[in-house]
Image: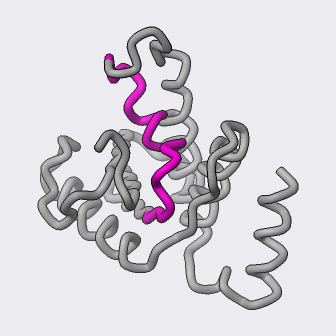
Amino acid sequence: MATIRILFIITTLIGLHHCFTDFQQVGLDIHNKHREHHGVPLLVLSKDLNKQAAECAKYYMDKGKIDHSCLIKRAIGENLYMSKGRDKGLARSVGLASEAWYNEISRYNYQDPESNKASHATQVIWKGSTELGIAALERHDKCVVVALYMPPGFV
């Protein structure tokens, strides 16, 4: 937790936190809280991945379902979340999505790591991933959250 506080203080001092939205910062903070718990390097937000995530969020919203078919991103890890009803804001939706992805860790099979029953959680804490992009889009009673990771996990 101290590392996250130090990172926040540094970005505040040099003004980097103004480059990203509140919901992106929420997503980054939650990802890094869990990554720190597992002793893996912290992620940084990427403007390029944020842009790709936004394009994919629009794609999935227009499609009406999430199915990992967005072609805008290539060779990038992806976690998806869709909710119906209002989550009371994009930051809350991103927070709920990020925690839901990580909470799959309880389904991880340490005897058979390839079983892939916790793929969202393992992508959140994948040691090799260094960059994160997050987008969230609300329309009517739906919300789509897309997280992109570079380099991707499971390669």
Q: On the rendered structure, is 11 left or right of 84?
A: right
Figure colour scheme: one colour
In magenta stretch: residue 62: no
Query: Closer to the camera, 64 or 23?
Result: 23
In magenta stretch: residue 116: yes
Q: Quadrant of residue 4?
A: bottom right
Judge whether 91 appears above or below 113 on screen.
below
- Residue 130 position within the rendered picture, expressed as x and y whole percent measured from the top left: 50, 61
Highlighted magenta segment, given as a residue range: 115-133
- Residue 146 position within the rendered picture, expressed as x and y whole percent measured from the top left: 36, 54
Q: Is residue 36 visible?
A: yes
Give the residue drawn at x 77%, y 69%.
7
Give the residue drawn at x 54%, y 34%.
102
Query: Closer to the camera, 112 or 34?
Result: 112
Judge whether 153 appears above or below 138 on screen.
above
Judge whether 36 appears above or below 111 on screen.
below
Q: On the rendered structure, is 20 left or right of 71?
A: right
Give the residue drawn at x 19%, y 62%.
74
